[in-house]
Image (cartoon, rainbow, N blue to C red):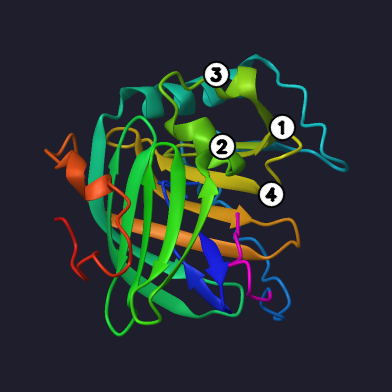
């Protein structure tokens, strides 16, 4: 979801589950690797029932004009996030230079999420609904930004309405997949996020790809997802790095 100190740091949701384009630590430089090509959503297999279609903005950041079918997909994605109370599961993050990291995540709407990276990484990302903290427990440092400065606020707010609040940059649909790429309308929230949701047997978030202001992409795939899990709200409290235990709240 993010990149910091040349190492990818995960999201939600997001990318997430967003749930966030790359955010760099204040003293860090963005990775120099060339951005990887953004993965394309699979189209319907030849001869399969239904037809895959897509629409993508050709230039600029104004978003696309949605027809009725595209608007239906965007509303279905909004309805999914509005219907989520909590999620937890595992994730695999792939950065633009193909480095992979994995770990556990949990999400509690509105606005709260946590990513605990598996060892040897000692990184945690926590959102308490207002601020997002990127913590390195090995180096004992932390960087914080306002959640409203990430596109994940669009997906994790109390009232999700992407057609109203986001610039829709791309819409794709196949028999068992919906894909929506979006960007915050606020100029203070750069970057974009592309979410992939399966539709069979039910609608479920599968992965997201974030693109930061420099065009660097990070992919997060999630699995073992448990919906409406009972989560401890205290796990989403941002603690100082000296007090934060290196363990997942799962």
Please tell me how crowded label 1 is: few (under 14), some (14-19), or many (20+) other residues with Cα within 10 Å: few
Alpha-carbon span between mark 3 and mark 1:
24 Å
Q: Work out whether residue 26 or residue 155 is closer to the camera in this orientation and state it.
A: 26
Q: Is 199 inside the magenta-drawn segment?
A: no
The circle drawn on residue 148 is 2
Closer to the N terminus: mark 2 or mark 3? 3
- Vertical order, 99 against 217 (above or below): below
* Tag in front: 3 or 4: 4
* Tag in front: 3 or 1: 1
Closer to the N terminus: mark 1 or mark 4? 1
Q: Work out whether residue 84 or residue 120 is closer to the camera in this orientation and state it.
A: 120
| Residue at the spot of label 3 | 72
Closer to the N terminus: mark 2 or mark 4? 2
Alpha-carbon span between mark 1 and mark 2:
9 Å
* Residue 50 visible, this angle: no
Q: Residue at x 68, y 76 (%)?
A: 29
Marks 1 and 4 in Cβ contact (< 8 Å): no
Q: Quadrant of residue 61?
A: top right
Closer to the N terminus: mark 1 or mark 2? 2
Alpha-carbon span between mark 2 and mark 4:
13 Å
Marks 1 and 2 in Cβ contact (< 8 Å): yes
Marks 2 and 3 in Cβ contact (< 8 Å): no
Please tell me how crowded label 4 is: few (under 14), some (14-19), or many (20+) other residues with Cα within 10 Å: many
Q: Which residues are magenta?
A: 20-29
Q: Secondary structure at mark 2?
A: helix
Q: Work out whether residue 109 or residue 172 is closer to the camera in this orientation and state it.
A: 109
Q: Secondary structure at mark 4?
A: loop
């Amino acid at each position: 979801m993010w990149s910091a100190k040349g190492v990818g740091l995960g999201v939600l949701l997001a990318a997430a589950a967003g749930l966030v384009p790359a955010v760099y630590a204040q003293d860090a430089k963005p990775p120099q690797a060339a951005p990887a090509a953004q993965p394309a959503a699979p189209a319907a297999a030849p001869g399969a029932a239904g037809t895959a279609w897509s629409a993508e903005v050709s230039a600029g950041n104004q978003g696309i004009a949605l027809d009725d079918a595209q608007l239906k997909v965007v509303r279905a994605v909004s309805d999914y996030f509005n219907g989520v109370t909590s999620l937890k599961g595992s994730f695999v993050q792939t950065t633009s230079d193909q480095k992979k990291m994995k770990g556990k995540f949990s999400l509690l709407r509105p606005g709260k999420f946590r990513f605990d990276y598996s060892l040897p990484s000692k990184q945690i990302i926590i959102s308490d609904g207002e601020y997002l903290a990127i913590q390195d427990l090995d180096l004992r440092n932390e960087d914080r930004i306002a959640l409203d400065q990430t596109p994940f606020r669009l997906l994790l707010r109390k009232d999700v309405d992407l057609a109203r609040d986001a610039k829709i940059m791309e819409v794709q649909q196949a028999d068992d997949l919906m894909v929506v790429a979006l960007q915050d309308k606020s100029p203070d929230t750069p970057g974009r996020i592309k979410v992939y949701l399966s539709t069979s047997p039910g609608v479920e978030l599968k992965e997201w790809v974030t693109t930061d202001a420099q065009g660097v992409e990070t992919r997060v795939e999630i699995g073992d997802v448990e919906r409406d899990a009972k989560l401890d709200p205290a796990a989403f409290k941002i603690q100082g790095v000296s007090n934060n235990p290196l363990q997942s709240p799962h």
